[in-house]
Amino acid sequence: MALQLGDIAPDFESDSTEGHIRFHDWIGNGWAVLFSHPKDFTPVCTTELGEVARLKPEFEKRGVKVIGLSVDPVSDHKKWAADIEETQGSALNFPLLGDPERKVSDLYGMIHPNANDTLTVRSVFVIAPDKKIKLTITYPASTGRNFDEILRVIDSLQLTAKHQVATPVNWKRGEDVIIVPAVSDEDAKKKFPQGWKTVKPYLRIVKQPQ
Ligand code: BEZ
């Protein structure tokens, strides 16, 4: 069965461009994003890896480590890294797993045989410090991902892990949020003493807690 939200992200050992990795040890006590690429030396993947390298400080600010995967061997990744730096202006600054035997790809269900039976799709897994999967997204090979959206979801996941709020459509960090229905008005008075706006009894808007 496919991995689902709330499942423990399977642990594995694999070679990477930054040496041998034991996944759970590598994650440590923070958050992680694991994302797959169909193949080395392909155009869309090249742009994505450059963009994630450029955004690395944004992930770090949020306590998130990033790690990519491609089914080609690490020796190919290392050659491809030169092209990424040359064409995207950002050098690979996070590990890229080599997975020629598809051990990790199969463990995480990254190969969707009805789309392509040898290459991975573009999978994204966001993993929390408790090693549970908090987000999965799957894009086809032909569509590059929007990593600003992944940062946006991480902001929501980290906020809602800490406070009893949910984030509305298109929410961005700093904007108003929603008090979750499980919190009664009486409890909300204690948790949100500055008050909130009741649009409907189930739709209560409050300033984003810090
Ligand atoms: C790409 O990264 O450009 C790509 C990879 C596999 C299939 C199609 C596009």
Image (tube, grey):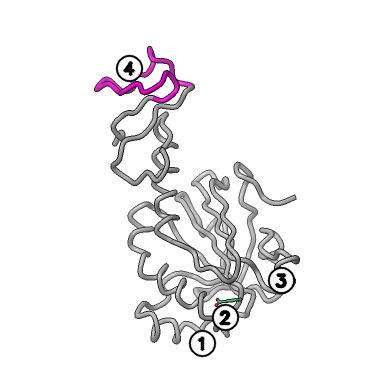
Asked whether mark 1 lies closer than 8 Å to ligand 1, one says no
N-term mark: 2 or 4: 2
Q: Disc 2 versus disc 4: distance between alpha carbons?
A: 53 Å
Disc 4 marks which amino acid? Answer: Lys
User: Any magenta on residue 124?
Assistant: no
Vertical side of 152 occupied by 77: above or below: below
Residue shown at 42%/42% (left/top)?
169
Nearer to us of marks 3 and 4 is 3
Q: Which mark is residue 79?
A: 1
Q: Secondary structure at mark 1?
A: helix
Q: Position of residue 190 (x, y in %)?
A: 32, 17
Residue topped by disc 3: 116
Q: Amino acid at mark 3?
A: Asn
Magenta region: which residues?
182-203
Q: CA distance from mark 3 to mark 4?
A: 53 Å
Marker disc for residue 40: 2
Mark identifier at residue 190:
4
Badge 3 crowding class, 10 Å Cα cut-off, few under 14, some 14 to 19, many 20 or more, is few
Q: Disc 1 versus disc 2: distance between alpha carbons?
A: 9 Å
* Residue 198, above or below 107: above
Q: Which circle's residue, 2 or 3, is located before the other in the chain?
A: 2
**Crowdedness of circle 1 by 10 Å Cα count: few (<14), some, many (20+)?**
few
The mark tally for this picture is: 4
